[in-house]
């Protein structure tokens, strides 16, 4: 008898299960903290990360599954796909289960030892066949070469603004002609009224996902000066300056957007 799910759907279900395994509800900012430290990707964050990002980023699931979809189209035989700021490997797994190109591997990079340690467990528990190499390093220091796809899902926003142009130039140089950069970010708005509206709607989204006023306020303070969003215009200008001939926004929900840029 044929199963209820296709092979691809089953893979997606396995991916979801392995990502969720060992993950807990995010209560990091649920109680008043006497000394609010700047946000870091430590073991406490890694332990609740799937819950945290799903309840904080509108459209996260869509962006992750489309990352797999785009990788299927753009990954080329004999090339590498990079997941920069891979956290627990959500984008890596989405690509792993869609890439059809022969002799194509994924390199996941994150500078948080706690994230990489958990990510290794997730990848080991996953049945995908595309080779995955995980590197615990600063993505600003790793070599990027023979890439057909580079993914930066919600990571550039944590890189110091003055270093972003050089990073994008290095990604451009490491991509093969025709290769794709997928860049997803929290975005800012030049118009103050629009910025205010999007911030309030985003907080509504978090409230609807069970975060309290205290959690929203404390997380916001912790991210101040740690997550620095750019406007979509700044992203477009920087991608063009790095050399990307074409760039477009394929997804936006409130103050979260995803762009694709092709070399
Ligand atoms: C996902 N892409 O699930 N070098 C390497 N890693 C870094 C650096 C750096 N310089 N700075 C930050 N990171 C993932 C989500 S989370 C986004 C990405 C978020 C890493 C950091 O350790 C963290 O794991 C990740 O980038 C950002 O789609 O939490 O909003």
Image (cartoon, grey):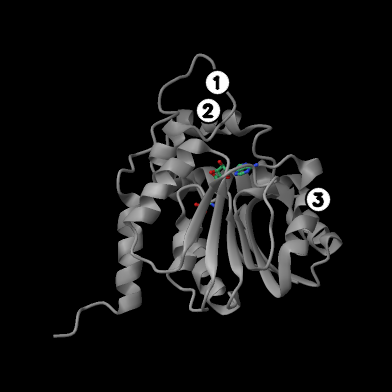
Q: Is residue 234 toward the left or the right of residue 23 in the image?
A: right
Q: CA distance from mark 2 to mark 1?
A: 7 Å
Which residue matches tag 3? 166
**Disc with the residue nearer the chain's start (2 vs 3):** 3
Q: What residue do we see at 74% from left, 39% from top? A: 160
Q: Tell me the tag on residue 36.
A: 1
Q: What residue do we see at 81% from left, 50% from top? A: 166
Foreground: disc 2 or disc 3: 3
Foreground: disc 2 or disc 1: 1
Q: Secondary structure at mark 3?
A: helix
Quadrant into which the C terminus falls? bottom right
**Percent coordinates x, y for residue 54 in the rendering:** 44, 50
Residue 105, above or below 222: below
Q: What residue do we see at 51% from left, 73% from top? A: 69
Which residue matches tag 2? 218
Estimate how packed mark 2 is, as few (under 14), some (14 to 19) or many (20 or more) residues with alpha carbons within 10 Å.
some
**Percent coordinates x, y for residue 2 in the rendering:** 18, 84
Q: From where the camera sits, is residue 146 visible?
A: yes
Q: CA distance from mark 3 to mark 1?
A: 32 Å
**Disc with the residue nearer the chain's start (3 vs 1):** 1
- Mark 2 touches mark 3? (CB < 8 Å): no
Residue 31, above or below 259: above
Residue in front for this viewpoint, 78 or 216: 78
Label 1 C-beta lies within 8 Å of the nearest ligand 1 atom: no
Quadrant into which the N terminus falls? bottom left
Which quadrant of the structure image shows residue 261?
A: bottom right
- Mark 2 touches mark 1? (CB < 8 Å): yes
Q: From where the camera sits, is residue 253 visible?
A: no
């Amino acid at each position: 008898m044929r199963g209820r799910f296709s092979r691809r759907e089953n893979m997606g279900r396995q991916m979801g299960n392995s990502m969720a395994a060992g993950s807990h509800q995010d209560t990091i900012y649920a109680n008043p903290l006497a000394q609010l430290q700047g946000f870091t990707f430590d073991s406490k964050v890694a332990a609740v990360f799937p819950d945290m990002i799903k309840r904080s980023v509108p459209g996260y699931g869509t962006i992750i599954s489309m990352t797999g979809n785009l990788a299927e189209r753009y990954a080329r035989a004999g090339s590498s796909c990079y997941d920069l700021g891979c956290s627990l490997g959500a984008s890596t797994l989405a690509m792993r289960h869609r890439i059809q190109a022969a002799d194509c591997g994924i390199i996941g990079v994150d500078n948080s030892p706690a994230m990489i340690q958990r990510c290794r467990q997730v990848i080991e528990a996953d049945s995908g066949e595309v080779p995955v190499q995980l590197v615990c390093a600063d993505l600003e220091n790793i070599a990027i070469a023979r890439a057909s796809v580079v993914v930066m899902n919600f990571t550039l926003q944590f890189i110091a603004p003055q270093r972003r142009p050089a990073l994008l130039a290095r990604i451009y140089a490491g991509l093969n002609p025709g290769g794709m950069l997928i860049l997803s970010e929290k975005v800012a708005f030049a118009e103050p009224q629009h910025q205010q509206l999007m911030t309030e709607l985003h907080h509504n989204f978090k409230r609807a996902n069970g975060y309290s006023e205290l959690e929203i306020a404390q997380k916001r303070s912790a991210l101040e000066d740690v997550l620095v969003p750019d406007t979509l215009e700044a992203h477009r200008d920087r991608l063009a300056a790095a050399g990307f001939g074409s760039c477009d926004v394929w997804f936006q929900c409130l103050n979260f957007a995803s762009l694709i840029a092709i070399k």
